[in-house]
Image (cartoon, helix red, strand yellow):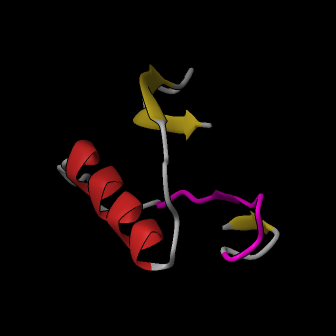
């Protein structure tokens, strides 16, 4: 995991990834929603979140979430 700043700062960045030993089916949208709820519990307000699905060169699928 990479982080810049604290969650309570006006601006912070967090990037994370997971690698499993065995293939897993993960509901990416649900995982993202839970992360956003956690941010709101930590005091985040007025988030405008944009989402894009992506696939890496190795065929790994994910969701990129970003916003203002």
Q: In which quarter of the image is residue 35?
A: bottom left
Tell me the quarter of the image containing the C terminus: top right
Q: Which residue is drawn at 66% across and 74% down?
A: 7
Position of residue 11 measured from the top left corner of the image (x, y, whole percent): 77, 58
Question: Which quarter of the image is occupied by the N terminus?
Answer: bottom right
Q: Where is residue 38 in the image (x, y as percent from the top left)?
A: 39, 72
Please name whichever residue, 32 or 55, is drawn nearer the observer in this view of the structure.
32
**Left or right position of 22 against 36:** left
Give 43 or 61, whichever is nearer the viewer. 43
Q: Is the magenta stretch mostly helix, strand or loop?
A: loop
Range of residues picked out in magenta: 8-18
Locate residue 34, reporting x and y percent: 29, 63
Report whether residue 18 is seen: yes
Name, please, the residue furthest toward the right: 4
Question: Which residue occupies 46% across, 23% down?
Answer: 54
* Magenta-colored stretch includes residue 16: yes
Magenta-span inclusion, residue 42: no
Picture quadrant where residue 15 is located: bottom right
Q: Is residue 42 left or right of residue 9?
A: left
Question: Residue at 42% across / 35% down in the picture?
Answer: 63
Can you give x and y, in whole percent of width and height, for residue 57 in the image? 56, 20
Question: Residue at (50%, 35%) from the top-left corner?
Answer: 64
Kindly tell me whether residue 21 is visible in this rendering. no
* Camera-side residue of 68 and 22: 68
């Amino acid at each position: 995991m990479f982080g810049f700043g604290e969650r309570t700062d006006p601006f912070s960045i967090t990037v994370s990834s997971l690698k499993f030993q065995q293939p897993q089916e993960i509901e990416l949208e649900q995982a993202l929603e839970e992360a956003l709820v956690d941010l709101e519990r930590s005091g985040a307000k007025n988030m405008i979140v944009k989402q894009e699905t992506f696939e890496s060169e190795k065929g790994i699928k994910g969701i990129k979430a970003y916003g203002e």
